[in-house]
Image: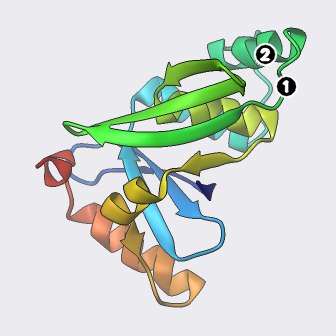
Amino acid sequence: MVALEVVGIRLDQISQSPILLLKESEGRRHLAIWIGASEAASIAQAIDDVEPPRPLTHDLFATVLGELGCPSPQMVITSVTDGVWEGEIRLRPGHVVQARPSDMVALAVRLGVTVGCREEVLEEFGILLDESPQDEVERFKEFLDHVSPDDFED
């Protein structure tokens, strides 16, 4: 498993759909995952430490995990099937819940845990960036300006 960091949320210039940007912690590969608007808002609020007046769904789920004695589950992006990203929340040995990566990231940011990714997924869908950090961001933005979700289908 490869540890990932959340780079942030961007908008696809063509479709105006939110894109979740992730980067491997100890490398230069990035992942771009198109997600829903509500998940993007939830992730952005958690990144920015925005405290909603009432708990959002991901806040509630994070609280429930803590109350059930599972405050630090392992979250792993496991595969991409027919253009759909898939993942698992591993609560404890033998207790695994299927989840969308966007929901896992929304929870991970709230819980302070790392999201992982199977090497095979990162190898197939990762975008390798070689430049300085600022150049990487600009190149990745340029890539996002010219890519669509259909580019990731076989």
Pointer 1: what residue?
71
Q: Which colour scheme is used?
A: rainbow
Q: 87 above or below 123?
A: above
> Which numbered marker is on residue 65?
2
The single residue placed furthest to the bottom in the displayed view is: 131
Q: Are marks 1 and 2 in contact (CB under 8 Å)?
A: yes
The first of marks 1 and 2 along the sequence is: 2
Label 1: how many Cα within 10 Å (few below 14, some 14–19, many 20+):
some
98, 143: nearer the viewer: 98
112, 69: nearer the viewer: 69
Q: 15 above or below 39?
A: below
Identify the residue at horizontal 84%, vertical 9% (top origin). 68
Q: Give left or right: position of 42 versus 125.
A: right
- Residue 121 x, y percent position in the rendering: 39, 54
On the question of residue 53 being in view, the answer is: no
| Three-letter code for the amino acid on which mark 1 is drawn | Pro
Identify the residue at horizontal 56%, vertical 18% (top origin). 97
Question: SS at mark 1?
Answer: loop
- Residue 128 x, y percent position in the rendering: 40, 76
Q: 75 above or below 129?
A: above
- Residue 108 x, y percent position in the rendering: 70, 36
5, 47: nearer the viewer: 5
Question: SS at mark 2?
Answer: helix
| Three-letter code for the amino acid on which mark 2 is drawn | Leu
On the question of residue 24 being in view, the answer is: yes
Quadrant location, the N terminus: bottom right
